[in-house]
Amino acid sequence: MKRVAAIDCGTNSIRLLVADLDPATGELTDLDRRMQIVRLGQGVDRTGRLAPEALERTFAACREYAAVIEELGAEHLRFVATSASRDAENREDFVRGVVDILGVEPEVITGDQEAAFSYNGATKELAGRDDVPPPYLVVDIGGGSTEFVLGDAHPSPTATLAGGAAHHTSSLAARSVDVGCVRMTERHLVHEGKISDPPTPAQIAAMKADIAAALDHAEEAVPVTQAATLVGLAGSVTTVAAIALGLDHYDSEAIHHSRIPLAKVRDITGDLLASTHAERAANPVMHPGRVDVIAAGALVLLSIMERVGAKEVVVSEHDILDGIAWGAALDGE
């Protein structure tokens, strides 16, 4: 058994997992799993730089996570940074700050590496289940990007994709595209410095066109219609699932491996796009940091389901963070 820590720092949130892993059985036992919305990618699509206030929010979360890691006695830590830090001109400021606080250098991974980590974390529990047959199409809808990964089996953490990310087999196809809930909101739903509330039909149409172009790009590398099971990851997907399930609070256990039909996703997306900030914020499952970006995230999910021809999405609470944890265990060998 190995005790490891994994940090996933994306465009919208930073998340920590401390877990005990048994490489012999493939079992992962959570000791602490937490998330903060720090909006590291604030303004990056427009300015190309990480904002000072966004960096400070992220570093504050890192200080909290450092205390948790020390308290639980994790033997190995792996810190992975994704879309926002890939795009930023001043990402070295981010790297130095993380090293000072946590003592490890963040790996600013490529989109393909991000996709493979997500696939590993999401599909490890699905092997052998008749109700969720492969091939699996894993879609990770983040703040700045969405990763698509198609594979035909569960992952082996010792195999590698070109570029160094662990995955299960050479048949895996992956692509990352620059479409995410924060990026789409900032690019299309902001008018005169404020987020439209609710968005106009023209804004929604522009967002749909942007998403469609990104899906065209994804399909150049990933034959998405070959998937037998669509697996959806990250906060936009899990929030839509929580709404679909009618939960009165956010319940990870109820959400994990829930199956949300296309018609339900379509209805929820329409409601979110037509709602005001106050109406979205009043939903008991809505994290305050997702109120302004959830409509865009839901539209990305709906667009993917319609393009793939998926009748439902299988929602996973296990994702890139779990894949990073397995990578941390291997690093310690």
Image (cartoon, rainbow, N blue to C red):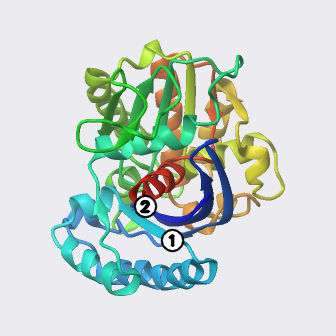
Q: Is residue 300 visible?
A: no
SS state under label 2: loop
Q: What is the three-letter code of the residue carrying label 2? A: Gly
Are the two marked residues, 1 and 2, in contact with CB atoms closer than 8 angstroms?
yes
Rendering coords of residue 236 (x, y %):
56, 48
Q: What is the three-letter code of the residue carrying label 1? A: Glu
Rendering coords of residue 88 (x, y %):
21, 65
Residue located at (49% from left, 33% from top): 155
Quadrant location of residue 42?
bottom left
Picture layout, residue 306 above or below residue 74: above
SS state under label 1: loop
Residue located at (62% from left, 26% from top): 127
Residue located at (69% from left, 42% from top): 241
Q: Nearer the viewer, residue 196 or 295?
A: 295
Q: Is residue 2 left or right of residue 140?
A: right
Rendering coords of residue 38 (x, y %):
47, 72
Label for residue 43?
A: none
Q: Earlier in the sequence, mark 1 or mark 2?
A: 1
Label for residue 75?
A: 1
Residue identifier under label 2: 332
